[in-house]
Image (cartoon, coloured by chain):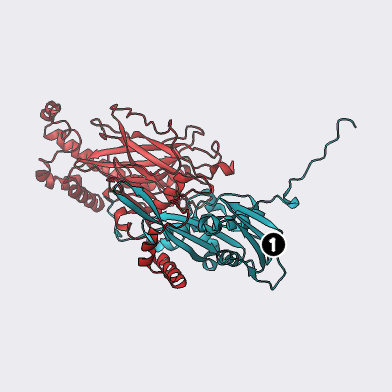
Chain colours: A cyan, B red
Amino acid sequence: QAADAGTTLCGKAEDKEWIPVTKLGRLIKFLEEIYLFSLHIKESQMIDFFLGTFLKAEVLKIMPVQKQMHAGQWTRFKAFVTIGDYNGHIGLGVKCSKEVTTAIRGAIILAKLSIVPIGKPHTAPCKVTGRCGSVLVRLIPAPRGTGIVSAPVLKKLLMLAGIDDCNTSAKACTVTLGNFAMTTFDVISNPYSYLTPDLWKDTVFTKSPYQ
Amino acid sequence: MAAFRKPVLLGLRDSAVHGSPTGPGSWTVSKLGGIPDVLPDLAAPRPECARCRQPLALVVQVYCPLEGSPFHRQLHVFACARPTCGDHGARSWKVFRSQCLEVREKQTQDAQNWENDHAAENWCEGADDWGSDSEEVPPPHLTLGFGNDSNSAKDVDWTAQLQDLHLQDTSLSTAHSAPPGEGMAASTVMLQFPPYYICVVDEDDYRDFASLDHAYCLLKDYQQREGVDMGQLISHSFSSDGDEKYEKTKIKSGDQMFYKFMKRIAVCQAQILRYSWGGEPLYLTCPTPEVSEVPACSHCGGQRTFEFQLMPALVSMLRSANSDLLVEFGTILVYTCEKSCWPQNHQTPMEEYCIIQEDPDELLFK
């Protein structure tokens, strides 16, 4: 084979540096460009590159899930991981795997891929609701100093996102953590998808045919 | 759980190539960029783009002799790098295979001949090693096709061998002096990327490399917070915990194939080449059915098999000094003839087949 010196792991030093795999990765300069055009994030290293040290990951819950097989029960672990930078970006990842640490690692990557921005303000922009399964979560804007008034899981998520003050209301079976976390994430990312007037395309006024 | 996988070798970028090396040291290495180093007695491949009729630039040169085969074997991958060529989509890509019979003693003979050239001695000086050369016959006439070529073997007598030897010298000397001159002229016409060597590692060496440290830290934090340890966690499983069921990962962007691709290369991000003769390619995007029908070899009609693929990390490394040259792709899968057929006395490289999978973001940029 290739007669080169350096059959030692010569790629190691370069592992620290992110080598983009997609065209988007090569061209992008600011993370906000992705959000402006609603592009999909396909490389988790992209997020690391831009938000890197600010990101903090947290495990919400690990639960074993079971599958019935003819030879007995097969247990796997489901990990819920949120990731955020306390300043406007939040992501949620869910991963099942045979081992706990593998599930956590997979969930971290998925969380990075699902990061959405939320606005800078200290609270929700308006009353927003979201649901997933049977769980319904409602965020209500609150004045500064209120703090986050909610269930612990919700509080964690909102804090990671950078929301400081919020009133919340939750309905239905919030014990199902999976649904609860997904709902919250859904609620927080809803405003991201609103089409506000400043994003409208300029309308071109044409003369009406009657003129 | 994984089925038996053929071993995969990864190519990583190594140091830059300095100058323009010649001789066996140049055509037995794998490199990216630069100009192709051809095997002796073979014509250099100089393909042209089907669309813009301009010469193609060398992307990668792989030296890959097959096990148990007496041939030196090289594969060259070319691409059209001009930004003005056609649309940004599938560019003109060509793959060429070159082979030449490996003759063991040839190496020492080469060394001696070079010394002769350098010392500017009369070629008769080389006459001293006729004795050792006589049993080793100059390539490729006699060593190929033992049955068929017996006639030609008889025809060869000393004078012919002498002449062959002479030709050998001149061909080597021309090979020696030509590249600097030819390279100079060619580089103005034939565009090239800055050349680097490629070093080879085994994918298995990297298998355990993905670090779980971060995951362990988080797990410890979680356990501290909830006051739960692993034993309790597992025993909890017998109390059915709400409606939580096994959830298959659904990627938000919908590109499951790409996610799997990223997972596989995550252990070694810098890989630019995956070599696995007869193995399974790692698809970047879902292969369309028409794309996965590989045509048979045009020379011997035999099947083509997967040999290696170029990885997207290569795109960032192919940057020329004048940034006009641009090659973009998702991944290139190279398929070569299963039998690696090579007719006798064949002088020109043979074309092979490659499948181009585009960058998944390509649609965004149209």
Q: Position of residue A202 (x, y in %)?
A: 76, 45
Q: Residue type at mark 1?
A: Ile
Task: Tell me the quarter of the picture where residue B229 sits.
Answer: bottom left
- Front one among A176 and B10: A176
Looking at this rendering, what residue extends furthest in the front direction? B239
Answer above or below: position of A82 versus B149. below
* Residue positioned 47% across, 63% down in the render: A61
- Front one among A92 and A23: A92
Q: Position of residue B236 (x, y in %)?
A: 39, 62
Looking at this rendering, what residue extends furthest in the right direction? A211
Task: Tell me the quarter of the picture where residue B162 sits.
Answer: top left
Name the quadrant of the C terminus of chain B: top right
Let me know if residue B202 appears in the view.
Answer: no
Q: Position of residue A114 (x, y in %)?
A: 54, 55
Answer above or below: position of B83 versus B242. above
Mark 1: few/some/many CA within 10 Å (<14, 14-19, 20+): some
- Label total for image: 1
* Residue positioned 52% across, 62% down in the render: A82
* Residue positioned 54% across, 40% down in the render: B88
Chain that bears disc 1: A
- Front one among B145 and B137: B145
Q: Is residue B262 left or right of residue B86?
A: left
Q: Secondary structure at mark 1?
A: strand
Q: Is residue B201 left or right of residue B56?
A: left
Return the residue at label 1. Answer: A140
Q: Is residue B121 left or right of residue A167?
A: left
Q: Is residue B147 left or right of residue B166?
A: left
- Front one among A24 and A87: A87
